DNA sequence: CTGAAAGCGCTTACAG
DNA sequence: CTGAAAGCGCTTACAG
């Protein structure tokens, strides 16, 4: 058996209260007893039991993170940022893979509550009413990352997706493109779907380019759907010089499909993506795309959450800067 | 305040013992009291406190997973497999990003112990003596994934790296290549470095090809190092028709570098990688590589660990099958 | 500066 | 079938 605080108290001839005080750096003991206790702790190899401590403190120093798909590069970059900040601030992180399926999310929320988690980060998932009220009733603070909510007590950290999409589209326009297709993300997705499409729309509009819905296709952010979308786009008769894809995977799918049709990127068609995956810069040609600082977003989300946990105060949301990564898949056609 | 077991006991006019029995599906109560208690639980929205339970049970239903770099696709695929199996078996997973740095690992081990974690999975890290003895003294079971150990009480799950490297090299040889370079992983890495190099060596030997150390370069598994290695290989005067890289990133680096030198893959040079990253199949040309079932490996590791936790018995190691993913970067030169 | 004791929210013999 | 009580390993007023 591992020794308990009682064991060290006994061995050091003091009370458990004293040991506890020393362990927690409180006041109320002489330097001499401190030395003695520290030494016995060392001798016995004593390690405090965080579970027992949590039962008193009502704090577990643990946060939960919900991802729709932990294995994606997107999620894992965010997780990295979260874990790092959390660790530096003495918190642990419990990962929860929710899949697409909402039932699992609710089950997880209940589990996290039972485990007395101090707070929750929702990654790239919308905060449904039922999730919110579950969290609310358990008084668990929550922050959103790569997602958004109107609730004043739920801060979020994300890029301005509409603006980013606007910038990507404008980037094409400024290089002389006017026949620009979009491979949009999942229809109805409020964050990465609709918003990016709106940015595309607005950019066209602001530059006097008429919108043509024949130039828009919807995918699900994954490679296959990018191929499909491009295949379909390549069948229309209207001219087409550039494509804005709402994810790098779809952009890569589009490139693949274009090359299957004997078209060269960027000579015959320009393509810009969205995500800046690690491998996107390694492609030949390297993919021009929109970068969002996922790591940093994770860090900020963790920071917000821990602040909420520790101060109990509301925390503001953050919009973090995106950037266009200029690489080799967009041609200047002016 | 959330209601406690006492609150529901009081409201239902029974003892906390009875409520506890019902909660835990033990025997010893009438169907009538069960109904009443269940109803009050429902009414009050009671949820048990897992921390309090853990303090009694000496079980937290939580496992810790240590990764050198959570944000890599490698780690996140394994994590996905672990999390899934754990969740299905009522365990949660705490992620720990250890970086390259060993001090952090030891700190984490201590933290996990304090948090009374039930078991630990080490991912692609060697189990140093100091880690082992820390775990040992705390009586925490451990399993290794994508790593290996000689200790009988530490099961592992991995691919046969030497054989996989052998197969990759043989794959090239069977297609007529005899001037085969290798871009090896980190020198001295006992799992992904040395072992894969040995597989390469043995394959050459078994097919009567003389080993030439001028054809071997060492990288660190990352893209940049693959570029470097290839650049250096392209300077030697000896003929060279194929390259086996110990990671997909290095393989992609090699392809990039080759194309910078005006060489076409696979026409001028064949390349085979190792990892089967998600994006490797999306490249043009798609990368021929060695696949290891990371997801499955994670699942098996979690299964082993939970078995150890719950039965206290030793569990055997597993070697899982790898596979050559035949794609487009290797040319038949016979 | 120090200790006895109550309490955190559960589980589990033990007794009836 | 049911309950009173001890105990899990800590923290924290309270009293001295």
Image: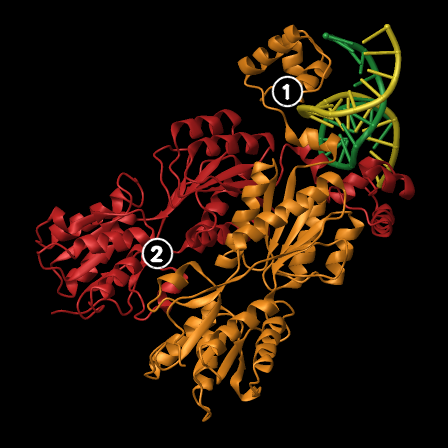
Chain colours: A red, B orange, C yellow, D green
Q: Quadrant of the N terminus of chain B?
A: top right
Task: Indicate the chain on which mark 1 is placed.
Answer: B
Q: Secondary structure at mark 2?
A: loop
User: Extreme front residue here?
Assistant: B334
Q: Nearer the viewer, residue A8 or A261?
A: A261
Residue A192 locus on image (x, y percent): 31, 46
Which quadrant would residue A180 be assigned to in this image?
bottom left
| Pair 2/1: label in front | 2
Can I make out residue B128 in this image?
A: yes
User: Is disc 1 placed on a helix, strand or loop?
Assistant: loop
Residue B66, above or below B161: above
Distance, label 2 to label 1, CA atoms, is 46 Å
The residue positioned 74% from the left and 47% from the top of the image is: B140
Position of B263 compared to B144: left or right? left
Residue identified by numbered label 1: B4
Looking at the picture, how far across and down is residue A303, in whole percent?
49, 47
Instruction: Tell me the quarter of the picture where residue B27 sits.
Output: top right
Label pair 2/1, CB-CB below 8 angstroms:
no
Residue at the spot 67% in from the left edge and 46% down from the top edge: B305
The residue sitting at the bottom extreme is B237
Q: Which residue is mark 2?
A: A275
Classify 10 Å Cα crowding around label 2: few (below 14), some (14-19), many (20 and above): many
x, y percent for residue B311: 74, 40
Q: Is residue A180 above or below residue B259?
A: above
């Amino acid at each position: 058996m591992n020794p308990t605080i009682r064991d060290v108290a006994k061995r050091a001839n003091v009370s458990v209260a004293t040991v506890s005080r020393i362990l927690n750096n409180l006041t109320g003991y002489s330097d001499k007893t401190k030395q003695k206790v520290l030494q016995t702790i060392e001798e016995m190899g004593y390690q405090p039991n965080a579970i027992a401590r949590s039962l008193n403190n009502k704090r577990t120093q643990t946060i939960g993170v919900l991802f729709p798909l932990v294995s994606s590069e997107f999620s894992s970059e965010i997780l990295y940022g979260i874990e790092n900040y959390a660790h530096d601030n003495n918190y642990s992180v419990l990962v929860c893979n929710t899949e697409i399926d909402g039932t699992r999310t609710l089950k997880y929320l209940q589990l996290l509550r039972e485990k007395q988690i101090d707070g929750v980060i929702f990654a790239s998932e919308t905060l449904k009413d039922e999730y919110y009220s579950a969290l609310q009733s358990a008084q668990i603070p929550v922050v959103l990352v790569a997602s958004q909510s109107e609730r004043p007590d739920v801060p979020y950290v994300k890029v301005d997706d509409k603006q980013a999409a606007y910038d990507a589209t404008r980037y094409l326009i400024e290089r002389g493109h006017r026949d620009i297709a979009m491979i949009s993300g999942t229809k109805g997705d409020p964050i990465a779907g609709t918003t990016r499409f709106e940015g595309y729309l607005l950019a066209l509009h602001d530059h006097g380019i008429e919108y043509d819905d024949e130039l828009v296709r919807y995918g699900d952010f994954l490679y296959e759907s990018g191929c499909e979308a491009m295949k379909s786009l390549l069948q229309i008769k209207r001219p087409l010089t550039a494509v804005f894809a709402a994810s790098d995977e779809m952009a890569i799918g589009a490139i693949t499909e274009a090359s299957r049709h004997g078209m060269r990127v960027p000579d015959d068609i320009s393509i810009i993506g969205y995500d800046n995956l690690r491998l996107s810069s390694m492609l030949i040609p390297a993919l021009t795309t929109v970068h969002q600082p996922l790591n940093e977003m994770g860090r900020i989300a963790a920071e917000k959450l821990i602040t909420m946990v520790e101060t109990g105060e509301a925390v503001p949301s953050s919009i973090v800067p995106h950037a266009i990564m200029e690489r080799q898949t967009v041609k200047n056609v002016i």
